[in-house]
Image (tube, rainbow, N blue to C red):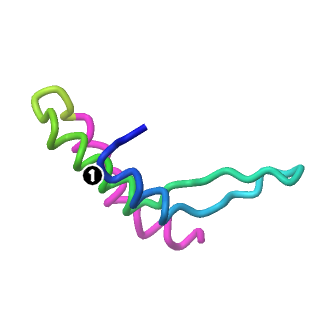
Amino acid sequence: MNVKGFDIAYSNAFDLDIGLRDKMKIASAPSLVLLKLIAWDESPERRSHDLEDIAFILKNYIDLKASD
């Protein structure tokens, strides 16, 4: 899969241990915002929900960081 920004998001993702020696990659909030901006920029007339998602992430980012 070749998606703009995915390589950056993946390299900044963190591992979440889900038990039984399994881990899953979780994108950081800044990476999610980057991917949402790229998606919105490619098709702004159809992707207004990306801006709403970005606003949600930004409004709640402090709470997300506090729970680290």
**Residue drawn at 67 percent across, 50 percent down:** 24
Predominant SS of the magenta segment = helix
Q: Position of residue 10 (x, y in %)?
A: 48, 57
Q: Pointer 1: residues within 10 angstroms few (<14), some, or many (20+)? A: few
Name the image quarter holding residue 3: top left
Measuring 47% from the left and 61% from the top, which residue is drawn there? 28
Residue sitting at 57 percent across and 54 percent down? 26
Give whichever of 51, 35 is nearer the camera. 35
Judge whether residue 62 is colored magenta.
Answer: yes
x then y, percent, for residue 25: 61, 53
* Side of 39 where 22 appears, left or right: right
* Label 1 sits on residue: 55
Q: Is residue 45 shown left or right of residue 26?
A: left
Foreground residue, 53 or 40? 40
Q: What are the residue bounds of the magenta stretch?
A: 49-68
Q: Quadrant of the C terminus?
A: bottom right
- Is 19 situated above or below 2? below
